[in-house]
Image: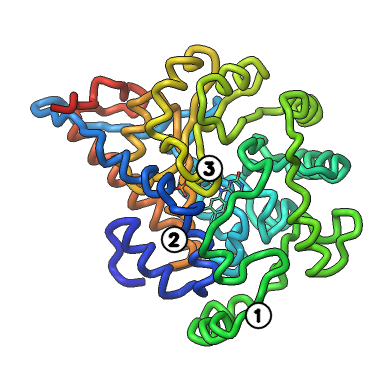
Amino acid sequence: MPVITCVEDLRRLAKRRVPKMFYDYADSGAWTESTYRANETDFGRIKLRQRVAVDMRDRTLASTMIGIPVAMPLALAPTGLTGMQHADGEILAARAAAKAGVPFTLSTMSICSIEDVAENTNAPFWFQLYVMRDKVFVERLIDRAKAAQCSALVLTLDLQILGQRHKDIRNGLTAPPRMTVPNIINLATKPRWCLDMLRTKRRTFRNIAGHAEGVTDLSSLSAWTAEQFDPALSWDDVKRIKDRWGGKLILKGILDAEDAVKAAESGADAIIVSNHGGRQLDGALSSIAALPAIVAAVGDRIEVLMDGGVRSGQDVIKAVALGARGVFIGRAFLYGLGAGGEAGVTKTLEVIRKELDITMALCGLRDIQRVDGNIIAENP
Ligand code: FMN
C-alpha cells in the first residue's frame, strides 16, 4: 500500500480501486448533498483550545460505549453493500475492528450475513436492524442476531422511506440494478476487484436471500428489498422490537430533541445522533450541529452517540467534547476497505487513533473520559 497519512489518502486510493458504481454509492449524499457536505464542514468550524506545560505522559483513549469497553470511543457504523467495496468486506472490517478493540456493526443490508460474520470472526459484533413490512422476517432476523451472540442491536429509525441519490440513479444502482455499458467498461479497469469478487461466494444480500418469503433470485430479491422499508414505523414497533431482542438497544437516526426525548422514554440504552451520513433528508442539520441541543435535552437520561462526517481524530474529540459518549464512522472505514481490504480498515483506525491521541495531548488532556466542553475555543 502507498504511504497513507490520513483518511483522505485512503479515499483517493479507494476511488482508484473500487468500481465507480460502488465507490459513488459510498461517497455520495441525497440530492444536492448539502447535508452530506455540512456533516464534514461543520466539524471544521469548531476550534480547539491549545494548552501548554501540562503533563501529557501516560495518555489513555480507553472508554466505554453502552457499558462495553472500547479501546477508543469509536465504532464502525452499519453500511449496506459493504461487501461490494471489497469482496467479503463485512468479515474483513469486523476482523480489523476486533483487532483495534472497537465494535463493528453489521447492516441488515450487508452482503455477508450475520452467520458469515459470526463464523469467520471471533469477537462479538453489533447488528443493525431496519424495520421491514415483513414482521416475520424481522422477528427471525432478531433471533438470528441473538443466536450469533451479537452484543447490541442498533435499530435504525431514519429510513422509513428510501432517500434518493442522483449518482446511484445515473449509475444504475437501482432496484433492479442496470448494467450499463459505462459500468461494464469501468469494471474492466478494476481487475483486482473483479478477481476477488469471483473468488468469493458472497455477492448478494445474504441476510435476506433464502430467508425472506418469495425471494428466490436476484430480481425477486431486489423487488422485495425496494418495497420493504416500513413507512408505518412507530414507537410501538420500537417497544415490540426491544422486548423481543431483550439485550442492549441503540436507536439510530435521531436528529431532533423532541424525538430524542421519546427515544429516552422508550428505555433504549443509547441513541445515535445521525442523519444517515447525509443520505436521507437533504437540508437537515449536520449531526455535529444537532448534537448539543440533543445532549441538553436527554444527556442526563440516555447515552448519546453520534455519527456523520467523522474523518479524523480531531472530529472524534470534538464530538466527545460536545457530549457524545462515542462516535461511529461510516465512509472513513469504507474508504480503507476499498483501498486495501482488512489492512485498509486497520489503517483507517490507526490513523484516527493517532490523531486522537496527539490532539488530546495538545489540548492538555490525558484521559479521553475527561474530555468536555472546556477544550472548545470560543469563536472570536
Ligand atoms: N445506516 C444504517 O443504519 N444501515 C445501513 O445499511 C446503512 N448503509 C449505509 C451505506 C453507506 C454506503 C453509507 C455511507 C452509510 C450507510 N448508513 C447506513 C449510514 C451509516 O450507518 C452512518 O450513519 C453514516 O455513514 C455516518 O456518516 P459518515 O459516513 O460520514 O461517517
- For the residue with label 1, is its CB less than 8 Å from the closest atom of ligand 1? no
Mark 3: secondary structure: loop
Give the residue at the far left of this rendering: 53
Say which residue appears at 61% left-offset and 71% top-offset: 172
Q: Is mark 2 within 8 Å of ligand 1?
A: no
- Camera-nearest label, 1 or 3: 3
Q: Which residue is mark 2?
A: 335
Neighbourhood count class around disc 2 (C-alpha, 10 Å): few under 14, some 14–19, many 20 upward: many
Please tell me which residue lies in front, 49 or 143. Answer: 49
| Dot 1 or dot 3, earlier in sequence | 1
Whether residue 154 is visible here, answered yes or no, is no
Direction from residue 271 to residue 161 in the image, left or right:
right
The residue tagged 1 is 198
From the viewer's perspective, tell me whether residue 297 is left or right of residue 227.
left
**2 vs 1, front mark:** 2
Q: Give the vertical position of 57 relative to 278 (above or below).
A: above
Helix, strand or loop for disc 1: helix
**Gap between marks 1 and 3 measured at Cα:** 36 Å
The mark that comes first in sequence, 3 or 2, is: 3
Pointer 3 residue: 281
Q: Which element type, helix, strand or loop, lies under badge 2?
A: helix
Q: Quadrant of the N terminus?
A: bottom left
Q: CA distance from mark 2 to mark 1?
A: 21 Å
Marks 3/2 in contact by CB < 8 Å: the verdict is no
Q: Percent position (x, y) of residue 2?
A: 31, 72
Q: In this rendering, does residue 363 appear at all?
A: yes
Q: Residue at x 48, y 85 (%)?
A: 189
